[in-house]
Amino acid sequence: MQFQTMSYWQLGGRNIDNQKCDFMVRSSMLSRVQNLRLVDLYRHGSESIWVTKGTNVYDITEWVPSHPGGEVILRAAGGSIDPYWKIFSIHQKQDVYDILEQYLIGTIDPKDLVDGQVPSEHVPNPFASDPERDPRLRVHSERPCNAETPVSELGTFITPNDVFYVRNHLWVPDLGKPEDYSLTVELYDGTEKKYTLQDLRDKFHEHTITATLQCSGNRRSHMTANARMTNGLQWEVGAIGNAEWTGVRLRDVLADAGHAVDDVPKEVKHVQFSAVEAYGASIPIAKAADRFGDVLLAYKMNGEALPPDHGFPLRVLVPGNVAARSVKWVNKITLSDEESPSQWQRRDYKCFGPNEGPNPNWDAARSIQEMPVQSAITSLRQVSSHSPQARKWMHVYGLEEDSVLLEGYSFSGGGREIVRVDISADDGRSWHQAELLEAETKGSKAWAWRRWRFIIPNSQAGKVFVVKAVDEAYNTQPDSYEPHFNFRGNLTSGWQRVENKPIPS
Amino acid sequence: MQFQTMSYWQLGGRNIDNQKCDFMVRSSMLSRVQNLRLVDLYRHGSESIWVTKGTNVYDITEWVPSHPGGEVILRAAGGSIDPYWKIFSIHQKQDVYDILEQYLIGTIDPKDLVDGQVPSEHVPNPFASDPERDPRLRVHSERPCNAETPVSELGTFITPNDVFYVRNHLWVPDLGKPEDYSLTVELYDGTEKKYTLQDLRDKFHEHTITATLQCSGNRRSHMTANARMTNGLQWEVGAIGNAEWTGVRLRDVLADAGHAVDDVPKEVKHVQFSAVEAYGASIPIAKAADRFGDVLLAYKMNGEALPPDHGFPLRVLVPGNVAARSVKWVNKITLSDEESPSQWQRRDYKCFGPNEGPNPNWDAARSIQEMPVQSAITSLRQVSSHSPQARKWMHVYGLEEDSVLLEGYSFSGGGREIVRVDISADDGRSWHQAELLEAETKGSKAWAWRRWRFIIPNSQAGKVFVVKAVDEAYNTQPDSYEPHFNFRGNLTSGWQRVENKPIPS
């Protein structure tokens, strides 16, 4: 319990003892809470910040500068914090409730309540700016939106924007006008430089790279199915996609802002990214400064302006690293000796041993950056002479026998190229090599997935197909799940097995 | 057969059709072979090169410039090629015999033979310069010397020079005086620059890195034992070692020689290394030019001059890559659009699928460079209260119960740090984390192995211990061997299992 208490504070680096002391002084001073009207909540402008939780009213003005999550707290000003605490589940702990209670100033007058509750129009909807989404996406959660690409749309080298998987931790921010948008770069010595979107386009060379983004939870459902229940969204094989990303190099922007990219001072170890909606993450400076690292501040996806779900107007694109580091809606970059203090850097995106969890020593594990080798089967179909459609495919592939055609992807982190994909048609007893499909890619390393195809006569196909890939460092995927289990279900990469029948899309 | 024929030729890039044509013309001209004396073999100096194979004599003068293996062939001048063909087994094929036969000029006079054979003093010993070796090394082959470090000597972070594993492909060259030694750097345009050892020390900054070298065959015997027989030396866990290497950066030398290391021309893709004794290999230019790649031209090992077996006076040290690229006795560096033409680059150090071999499409597989994640148990001992010695250890580790103490190493390629080592004390059913031991290292990345320690009470220890490691990209080791089998037995990394009893050293 002590650890959990500390962790909330550590995120913001505050001193809990001082806060507890304030609380005691305050509690003794506050004799009786007031009866307040809803209209009072909005009266104070930026001078004082009042919020509700349930039917209680709190004046959190003095708390705001100490809030570990930063200024995102202002989103709740004049309204209810309930929807935000639901999203930021870190608040659902006694010590956080205790902090809030010290700022209690009153309760909502029963005249303003409906069925004993604050009416819904006074409860903000943080997701009001979320866009319409393509109905083909397989939705795991609506708010925040988490939706994967169905296997029917995973068959192309480039994943179209409309069906590219969406992994939002919060809401899609309402950004106002793009011309008002600016990015602040803060160097290690605290000096800041601001760039508008136009500045970025005018001052820097434009670069395009082909890069696969993969959520660390991709294939998590396979770990749950083959080992034990895991915490998190139960993604199938579609929390991954490949696109062409266009923007300017982070390296160039850092250099322009005054950072010595080729002779990095020892103290600078991480580049932190903060986003408009409160998400944050970081990457090691070595990746950001690497001239072959290809980290972009991207404003285009597959030749179009970034869609709202993918970071419009500006996102970070860290090829080869877990997608959680490719921060969307980025508006602040900070050079630091520390990783981002966000929960997404210091907690959620880590792996632990099969025996650990759900309350591990979070600091003991490394934040996920580069990803391990991965592969999946996205299509399995009969190519038989029994139908005209299938006969066409027999002709295309020059087949003489009725066959099974498998297709899928393979991918590895760190720009490590896939060198081999092994397929078993008899549940892992014997192996064949899939054909690795050629594709034109842009960028300094192998940032894009490798599509593969495998055809085998029906007469040689058993009941279960298995896929595993090998990357250029000859890393391969583990055979099983339980010995590689982690309670967060991150980076699931055990061999995928599929039955010899069409995959439902 | 056609493929095998071509492969010999492709190594040298020659045109076999012309050669065959020569052969037919020659054969028709050569009416009768002569009877020759041994003393005649030496008569010709550099004007014509005669060699014997068995009791036949060949004038190979015209062949020398076409020899795919280069000038190493001159080592056999005036003597028998038999010992060399035994080492360079690529010659043991009909098409190579055919080539030789076209240069037949005679047979050794029976007066010079002993028991029908050329006497042994006329058969050269290529290994005459090989040094004495430490008797603690476990020898797999004497000539060339291949010997691993016994587990009894694998317990320290730095492996002492005397017991560092030796992996020689050929003989240890006789180099003459160090002051006569020079290194030639040939740029892509053919211009050359020469450096003496003194030049290297005088012109360039000295750097020291801590780096682990591992043979791609390390743990090959485990693949043989757990899957099927593999081709190659049956190394146990000791074809690996860790040392401090001192020298100058290859990057700096290339820059000095006129190569644009930060703006590499597109055509330059590989840096080829050739050694005095005929060994050769190459690495990608990206690794050589990387300012954090730490590739050295090393002249010291653990603070002393390189021992003869480890490349005296100069070797390449490519941290993070398979040791076969850290060419010993290097005297020529060539920038090229191609990999080294040597068999060690284009054949031996590759992996294929479990279903492939022993005559695969060699060109289809990637040369091994960076290595996958690896771990091994090097020590297992009882720490019980029954002996004064063991009681001491119980005190040191603060143990209250009789326990089992395991130690070992973990390592990954590409400078990827080890982040976790999992140990099972019940043959893989449940897992614990080993303690990762701290050690001071030098260099830009995690080039050194990570030692680990694990202690478990006897009451909780089963019959079989298992180890597996995880690196910073969360790559892990495959569970088994057969599905990851490759006929060369390279990069064996299935989980090591050891019985719960002391490991024989």
Image (cartoon, coloured by chain):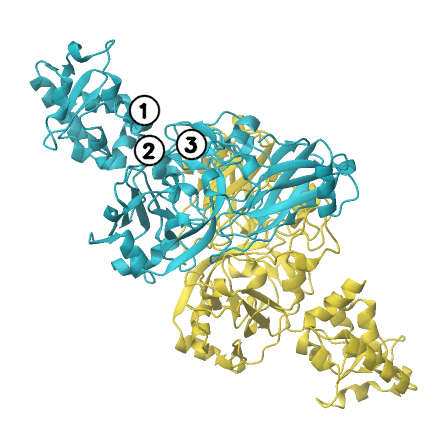
Chain colours: A yellow, B cyan
Q: Toward the viewer: B456 or A433?
A: B456
Q: Residue at x 30, y 30 (%)?
A: B128
Q: Which residue is mark 3?
A: B146
From the viewer's perspective, is the residue at label 3 or at label 1 nearer? 3
Task: Between residue B309 and residue B462, name the one nearer to us.
Answer: B309
Identify the image quadrant of the C terminus of chain B.
top right
Which badge, 3 or 1, is on the more N-terminal residue? 1
Q: Which residue is mark 1?
A: B86
Query: Residue A37, relative to residue B160: is it above or below?
Result: below
Residue contact between numbered discs 2 and 1, judged by CB atoms under 8 Å: no
Could you tell me the amino acid type at mark 3? Answer: Asn
Mark yes or no: residue A302 visible: yes
Q: Chain of mark 3?
A: B
Amino acid at the residue labelled 1: Lys
- Determine which of the numbered discs, if any, sits on residue B171 in the image: 2
Q: Chain of mark 2?
A: B
Q: Chain of mark 1?
A: B
Report whether residue A249 is seen: no
Q: Dot 1: few (<14), some (14–19), or many (≥20) neighbours within 10 Å?
A: few
Q: Position of residue A193 (x, y in %)?
A: 49, 81
Mark 3 element type: strand
**Residues behind callouts 2 and 1 on a single chain:** yes
Q: Residue at x 44, y 31 (%)?
A: B488
Q: Quadrant of residue B394?
A: top right
The quadrant in which residue B502 appears is: top right
Above or below, B396 relative to B234: below
Q: Are marks 3 and 1 in contact (CB under 8 Å)?
A: no
Density class for disc 3 (Cα within 10 Å; few <14, some 14-19, many ≥20) is many
